[in-house]
Amino acid sequence: MRKLIVISLLVILSGCKLWKWGETYHYHIPTGKHSDTNCPMIIHETEVWGGEMIMTFNPERMIDTVYNFSYWNKLGGMMPDITSNMIEGKHQSARVAWRINPPDVDHIYLGYIVYVYGKTEPYRDYLLTPEGERIKVSIGEPFYIFVSKNKAGWWGITYGHDEAYIKIVDPYLKREKFMVVMDPYYGGTPPAPTGINISLKIKDTTWIY
């Protein structure tokens, strides 16, 4: 049964778009949905995800008095071998996250969500400047964001040109064979209250910590 599930997953993923350096990908999360209708995962043998990203949406429709945006939405990132993550339950992933903090609805606040093998709850928080300020970006303003997997066994997430950086150790990463690139995803329980457009121009990077 397990072998059948693995084969089925690989067949499904083989039909997904491949992630290529220099390409620009456009995502649209419709109102009432969590993700783009395109294939949500991209297979690519890489240890770095990211580039220039732009987000646009109607800020007046993002105000949510029920959930008050106490959760993080996922902009994208990476996870290891999907067979071990989905079948064996050894969930690992590192993603750039964002949220809106009312009453400020004109900016998105950037953060991260990192699941480490063997840890029940993820690491989840804001990305901060060296001065301790929360990173925020105006709606429609281009920004650079990267997620990296190091062979020694840790995740790294950086904003801009080293303006903010977080490093989280996960020694099991070095055992993984390939990475799965994760596309944007809105919310947990609540879906997107308005349409969200996201573009990402994939750029190579050589930053190493």
Image: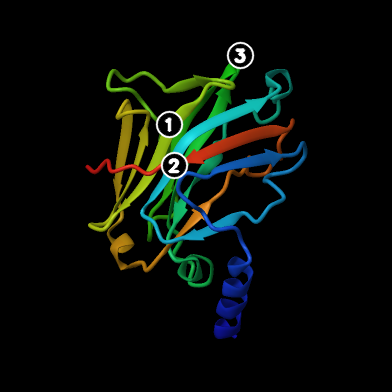
Residue at the disc numbered 3: 103
Horizontal and vertical percent position of residue 155: 33, 48
Kind of residue indicated by mark 3: Pro
- In the rendered image, the vertical position of residue 84 relative to residue 195, given as above or below: below
Q: How far is mark 1 from mark 3, CA to CA?
A: 25 Å
Residue to which mark 1 is pinned? 144
The span from disc 3 to disc 2 (Cα, nearest Å) is 29 Å
What is the quadrant of residue 5 in the picture? bottom right
Q: Where, quadrant-wise, is the C terminus in this rendering?
A: top left
Q: State the image coordinates of residue 115 (x, y, percent, origin top left).
A: 43, 52
**Foreground mark, 1 or 3?**
1
The structure residue drawn at horizontal position 27% and vertical position 22%, both measured from the top left corner, is 130
Look at mark 2 in the image and give the residue it sits on. 50
Q: Are marks 3 and 2 in contact (CB under 8 Å)?
A: no
Q: CA distance from mark 2 to mark 1?
A: 7 Å
Q: Is residue 17 above or below residue 157?
A: below
Neighbours of disc 1 within 10 Å: few (<14), some (14-19), many (20+):
some
Q: As drawn, is 118 to the left or to the right of 9?
A: left
**Front in this rendered view, residue 22 or 109:** 22
User: Hey, which residue is sitting farthest front in the picture?
Assistant: 22
- Near mark 2 (Cα within 10 A), the count class, few <14, some 14-19 or many ≥20, is many
